């Protein structure tokens, strides 16, 4: 445990003021801003029409849907690629592997950092939904929409948490990919291709089993009462157990790598 704490402190210092931390806030806020613009332009369509009596739910459902079904998939690939690039571009692995701290601790510390980043981004997304709703109400945008309706925070927090836990397996996979290969493009391509497949998987039950479909299926099951959530426990179990297996494999793989 002491080795992991040392590795976490080292990663925290290396990533201080890095682009990755800025993206933790920029990413989810960009999604919220996009959804707000959609509402301003077309308040009577899609989710806005379905939740006409409570625009908070329309705003939150649209934002979480865009985030968990597409944006977070690419976001995880980008963040893990940036994390790996910190070492790859300066041959930092050579220095790290000469230190007395075990290699596995460095690997797991990097994955924990990504888990923290995605968790913070999800929280910022929910806070952004509230902030945008308050701003729209203050500016009296589309006054026929009643932003004075109550916010079901328990539902939104549940949806955000389910989406986050559903992303653990992807985080583990992309952490290994981003740290295993030197090419930033390779890690990005894996994320893009997987996201394309996820778009098709989300339209079927395959989304419950496909790693890149799990965040969207898990998160949206809490927001859409018409969704059959009978497979949700299995999806969450696959995400958590799969993340543990991939993490152990990645930690083992990094201990046997020859980077000299």
Image (cartoon, rainbow, N blue to C red):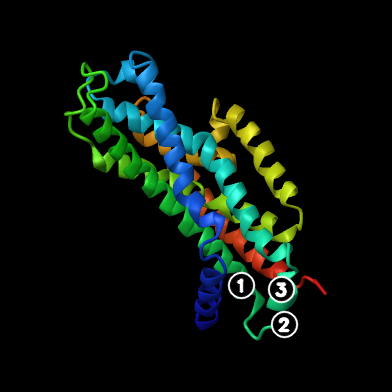
Circle 1 is placed at which residue position?
A: 106
The CA distance from mark 2 to mark 3 is: 12 Å
Percent coordinates x, y for residue 182 in the rendering: 76, 58
Can see residue 228? no
Q: Along the line of sight, which residue is nearer the eye, 155 or 245? A: 155
Q: Residue furthest bottom?
A: 100
Q: On the picture, is 25 further left or further right than 245?
A: left
Circle 3 is placed at which residue position?
A: 255
Instruction: Give the mark nearer the N terminus: 1 vs 2.
Output: 2
Q: Residue furthest front?
A: 139
Circle 2 is placed at which residue position?
A: 98
Instruction: Give the mark nearer the N terminus: 2 vs 3.
Output: 2
- Front of the two marks 3 and 1: 1
Q: Secondary structure at mark 3?
A: helix
Percent coordinates x, y for residue 163 in the rendering: 44, 43
The CA distance from mark 1 to mark 2 is: 12 Å
Q: Residue at x 38, y 47 (%)?
A: 124
Q: Residue at x 21, y 16 (%)?
A: 144
Contact (CB < 8 A) between labels 1 and 2? no
Q: Residue at x 53, y 79 (%)?
A: 6
Q: On the picture, is 209 further left or further right than 67?
A: right
Task: Note whether 109 is above or below 36 in the view shown.
Answer: below
Badge 2: few (under 14), some or many (20 or more) residues near its Cα, within 10 Å?
A: few
Q: Secondary structure at mark 2?
A: loop
Task: Note whether 138 is above or below 117 in the view shown.
Answer: above
């Amino acid at each position: 445990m002491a080795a992991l704490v040392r590795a976490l402190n080292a990663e925290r210092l290396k990533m201080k003021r890095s682009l990755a931390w800025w993206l933790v806030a920029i990413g989810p806020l960009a999604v919220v801003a996009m959804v707000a613009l959609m509402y301003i332009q077309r308040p009577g369509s899609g989710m806005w029409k379905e939740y006409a009596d409570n625009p908070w739910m329309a705003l939150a459902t649209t934002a979480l849907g865009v985030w968990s079904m597409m944006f977070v998939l690419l976001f995880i690939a980008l963040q893990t690629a940036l994390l790996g690039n910190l070492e790859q571009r300066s041959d930092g692995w050579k220095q790290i592997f000469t230190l007395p701290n075990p290699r596995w601790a460095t690997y797991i510390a990097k994955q924990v950092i990504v888990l923290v980043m995605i968790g913070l981004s999800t929280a910022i997304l929910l806070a952004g939904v509230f902030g945008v709703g308050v701003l729209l109400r203050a500016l009296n945008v589309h006054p026929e929409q009643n932003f004075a309706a109550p916010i079901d925070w328990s539902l939104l927090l549940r949806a955000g948490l389910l989406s986050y836990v559903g992303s653990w397996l992807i985080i583990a996979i992309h952490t290994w990919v981003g740290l295993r290969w030197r090419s930033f493009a390779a890690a990005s391509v894996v994320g893009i291709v997987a996201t394309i497949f996820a778009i098709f998987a989300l339209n079927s039950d395959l989304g419950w089993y496909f790693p890149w479909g799990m965040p969207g299926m898990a998160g949206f099951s809490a927001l859409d009462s018409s969704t059959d959530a009978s497979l949700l426990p299995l999806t969450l179990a696959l995400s958590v157990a799969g993340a543990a297996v991939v993490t152990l494999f990645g930690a083992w793989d990094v201990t046997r790598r020859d980077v000299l």
